Image (cartoon, coloured by chain):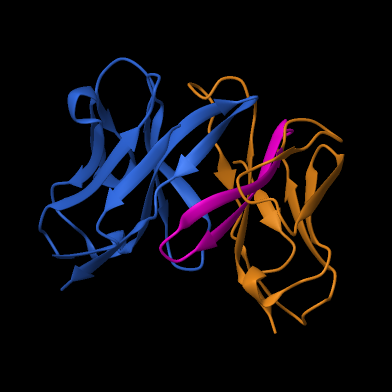
Amino acid sequence: AQSVTQLGSHVSVSEGALVLLRCNYSSSVPPYLFWYVQYPNQGLQLLLKYTTGATLVKGINGFEAEFKKSETSFHLTKPSAHMSDAAEYFCAVSIIQGAQKLVFGQGTRLTINP
Amino acid sequence: DVKVTQSSRYLVKRTGEKVFLECVQDMDHENMFWYRQDPGLGLRLIYFSYDVKMKEKGDIPEGYSVSREKKERFSLILESASTNQTSMYLCASSLSAWDMKTDTQYFGPGTRLTVL
């Protein structure tokens, strides 16, 4: 069965520092992987997704993630954090059970220190 | 732009009440989903629907039911609300269930339900 583990429920970085949010997945078939962001009092918004092809995926707001099959990882990075990046981030993997659905990780809350 | 709207942002109900949460999407999407979001647990799928009048259970359907009479509207029903159903409820929609490669789930703003 597919599952997602996000390492670290809270991550705190300084403004301008590297952001690294970790995600590991378990899947018996080649996965489709997603990162979503949730700003305070809002729904989830898609940041980026990996389906096939290039393993380095670029998303919105300067974020990118790299699919590493050997490590079963899909970590999210941003070279330089901005105050507006403060939010909760969710990693997800798609599964097929009749229809395609998403299985989400537990979420990582990112705090940016001035 | 795809728009998914939910009828209430905040809702307070009493134990035993019947609760309706409404979700409407304006992009003619086939699929609609109801999730529950709790701290430390991420999002968990309650029910989803891939067509009008069609529904399938997700991972945590107990205590919930759903209704989809029209393509654009998907309702989540708590037949008899309990305090352990206090949570954030998120609705989502996507164009097609069958091609996650090109498809994306779009989320509403959420309804924070408190059951007293």
Q: Give the magenta range.
A: B28-48
Q: Residue at x 66, y 44 (%)?
A: B33
Q: Residue at x 18, y 50 (%)?
A: A20
Relative to B105, does residue B84 appear above or below in the rendering?
below
Q: Predominant secondary structure in magenta? A: strand
**Outermost residue, left direction?**
A17
Relative to B37, does residue B48 appear above or below in the rendering?
above
Q: Residue at x 74, y 59 (%)?
A: B63
In the rendered structure, the answer to whether residue A17 lies left or right of residue B22 reads left
Q: Which chain is blue?
A: A
Between A2 and B5, the one nearer to me in the picture: A2
**Outermost residue, top direction?**
A53
In the rendered structure, the answer to whether residue B76 lies left or right of residue A46 reads right
Figure colour of chain B = orange
Q: Is residue B11 magenta?
A: no
Q: Quadrant of residue A3?
A: top left
Q: Quadrant of residue B87?
A: bottom right
